[in-house]
Image: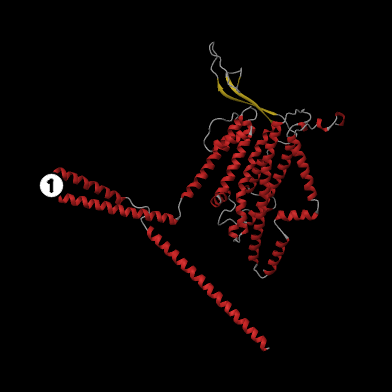
Amino acid sequence: MLEFGSLSRYFPWSTWDLTPALATLLLSMTASRWLWRKERCKMCFAVYLGLSDAQDKRMKGFTKLNRKVPAATKRVLSIQQRLRILYKLRARSDSFCIALAALSVLTVWLQFRAIWRSSAKFHRDLPLQSPGETYAALLFLITVLLLYQVYYRYSVKMEIMVLRNQIPQECGGSIWRSPRLLLLPLLAEMILCGVFLPPLIHGRVYLEEERFALPRATLEVVPACPNPLTMKSSHQGCELEYSYPLEIVNMFVLVRLYWLARVIRNQLLKRVVAMTMSSRMLAGKDVPVDSLWWSFRVSFALRPSKVLLTLFVVLWVSTAAAVSIFERPFPSKLDGEDHALWLTLVTMTGVGYGDAYPITAGGRVAIVLGAVFGGLAFISLMTSEFLDSLKGTKREDAVLSAMDSLKWERDVRAFAAQLIQAAWGQHRLRNGEPKQRGKLSRRVNKAAHQFKRCRKRKPMHTGDASHALQTGGLSALVLNQVESWLVATQVESDTLLDSLEQQVARMENSLQTLL
């Protein structure tokens, strides 16, 4: 290598590759130096396990104070304490997996930016010259760590299931001998998190998509294909030809974003484990604390704005990144992230101006899955939250029903008075002219029809709206009186205690003088 001048001949990387290479080297050296000391390693291990010296002392004191507790009670308490620790371990493992999954997606995006923006040419015999090779090595390291964390997470989950009597204790020795309830999800997650393109493997993927057939050529009309489509001589049709680098396989890494769904459950489990609860709740017999759907519903009910904002940002950014990568082979508006973000936003909102649209099959699939279906889910959740916010409280409903009941009673009285008035006029002119009698008869029928319709229309709540208001006001009055009485008694008791303390102090002083 020195014969040709420098290492730059064999490593003609751009700034997009040199920067992560140097950053990775510096971070590795810093982490190695930080973990070199034995005390730091112990501290890191204790933090990872969720243990501390104070907690260890507290547990020893707890065992000393409870020596006379029966064996069955001790076993239940030990299982509950072990479940708490295991839930913390699983939450920390999920946090590591979530961070690694997000970092892998960011690495893939930076790798494609390095590939598309690099103009350096490389030889096939020197794969290190390929742009984006640093990101490929970093992605390999992240994937190995992620697979290890997935295996460790399922080991913790297997112990949890053994303590909760969901699987027999004989299966607790090895995770590969566990039942299908645990083994199949492990294999599925290992496959989903393990698909990527290893480093030092390069090439191109050529694709052809047939779009439409052309009519037969005549002397007057010669069919042609619009740009960027090309016409094949073998058959009368227009096809779209394009190619990707072999690193397009790494787009499957976007599937790892499913780990973000476990953030919601981990936040709920932190509250559940931190609370003082029974072993039944930890075992999941009262509520399904391990269910992702239950965790999502509870989190959406507690913090809807936070859940909606997180869902919107994840769908928006991931879909725009996928569309911009898939549309790179063609010079269009969508080969940059800004127009891809705009297209994803207008598609999620259901507007769709039509100023830009994806051409490739991958771009269309990404926009349908991420923007169309994801936008429908986001708009549905936002609409449900908006409708729930419009619902009034019980007191507001009681006020509305009381107002409607008073209006209905007033209308019934008014229509009844009109009917009586019309009937009395008809009675007085029973011997009058036929024309006037027909007019009064129509007036009576109209008043009777209006009175009948008003009687059939019932108010919003025919029951105890006004009674509810009265009882609500009465309860508020009683509550205010009780609070005022409590305050007054507290003041009296404080003054009495102060006077007693003064008397005791005087007696002590007098005794000291006598002695």
Is residue 196 visible in the rendered structure shown here? Answer: no
202 sits left or right of 444 in the view: right
Residue 208 percent coordinates (x, y): 62, 25
Tell me which residue sits at (49%, 47%) in the image: 386
Q: Nearer the viewer, residue 6 or 200?
A: 6
* Residue shown at 29% from the left, 48% from the top: 453
> Relative to residue 239, is residue 166 depicted above or below?
below
Q: Residue at x 73, y 40 (%)?
A: 138
Q: Inspect this view and state whether residue 316 appears.
A: yes
Query: Crowding near pointer 1: few (<14 within 10 Å), some, many (20+)?
Result: few
For residue 216, side relative to residue 107 (left or right): left
Q: Is residue 147 left or right of residue 393?
A: right
Q: Quadrant of the C terminus?
A: bottom right
Q: Nearer the viewer, residue 107 or 238?
A: 107
Q: What x and y, as percent, mark residue 374?
A: 56, 40
Extreme-right residue of the structure: 3
In the rendered image, residue 353, in percent from the top left (x then y), is placed at 53, 32
The quarter of the image holding the N terminus is top right
* Residue underneath mark 1: 432
Above or below, 368 relative to 178: above
The quadrant holding residue 513 is bottom right
Q: Amino acid at mark 1?
A: Gly
Identify the element where label 1 is drawn: loop
